[in-house]
Amino acid sequence: MGRIAVTVLASADAVVEDPAGVEETEHGGWALGLEIGAECERYKLEELLAAESLLLGRVTYEGLAASWDGRDQSGFAETIDALPKYVVSSTLAEPDWGETTVLCGNVIEQVRMLKEALPGEILVPGSLQLVQTLFEEELLDELRVLLFGRIVGGGRRLFPPGTDPKPMRVARSRNFDNGIASIVFEPREEVPSV
């Protein structure tokens, strides 16, 4: 059975929307110009190499396809190109990025079947709407946040107001030389109060 690991970039004020600016949102591109550094870049490549497949929403899929398809940068492009990709979409009919399967219909059923069928880690980069659904349905096994020391001042957050609270625990964390931190959360059982 596969494990679903979500990975997102977040600002200090919890904005996760469009860090690279490919979606052309009002606050998009907030991570551009920040020095990632070799140590953090290596960490992200190792995360990708540990994945057996990618699960994506359509918007993230199209952004990654435009950014990485056929490009060779530090091993990222080659690795992403080779991974099987599963895209949750009701509008994407014919994906043009290799190794892509479109999941349509009931998202929850599709993801549950995928999780049961695939071994190893199913990595979900970005994909805000999909992540919110996975969280609500308790289908995510790990939430990895790469936290940047930048205040954006606006933009979508990973979990909007009104999200049902669920207990999480910090499974591990790491600080990089460039001031970026990695914080990994896992769901935990709620302890009933006495």
Image (cartoon, grey):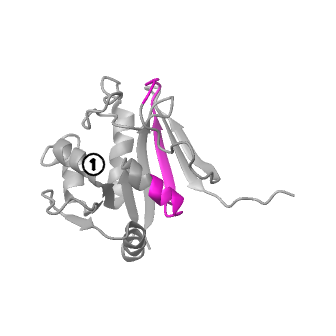
Point out residue 9 in the picture as x, y percentages from the top left corner. Answer: 41, 38
Q: Nearer the viewer, residue 71 or 9?
A: 9
Please, what secondary structure does the residue beneath circle 1 have? helix
Quadrant of the image containing the C terminus: bottom right
Q: Residues within 10 Å of mark 1 (few under 14, many from 20)?
A: some
Q: Nearer the viewer, residue 134 or 188?
A: 134
**Residue 138 located within the stretch drawn in magenta:** yes
Q: Nearer the viewer, residue 49 or 5?
A: 5
Residue 54's quadrant in the figure? bottom left
- The residue lying at 15 percent from left, 56 percent from top is 97
Point out residue 182 in the picture as x, y percentages from the top left corner. Answer: 49, 39
Quadrant of the image containing the N terminus: bottom left
- The residue lying at 23 percent from left, 66 percent from top is 101
Point out residue 167 in the picture as x, y percentages from the top left corner. Answer: 65, 53
**Residue 60 located within the stretch drawn in magenta:** no
Outermost residue, right side = 194
Residue 36's quadrant in the figure? top left
- The residue lying at 40 percent from left, 48 percent from top is 128
Can you say whether 26 is above or below 83 in the image? above
Q: Which residues are magenta?
A: 132-154
Q: Nearer the viewer, residue 75 or 33?
A: 33
Q: Horizontal placement of 58 versus 43: left or right?
A: left
Point out residue 108 in the picture as x, y percentages from the top left corner. Answer: 42, 68
Q: How many marks?
A: 1
Residue 25, visible in the rendered structure: yes
Which residue position is annotated with label 1?
A: 59
Residue 75, visible in the rendered structure: no
Which residue type carries mark 1? Val
Residue 22's quadrant in the figure? top left
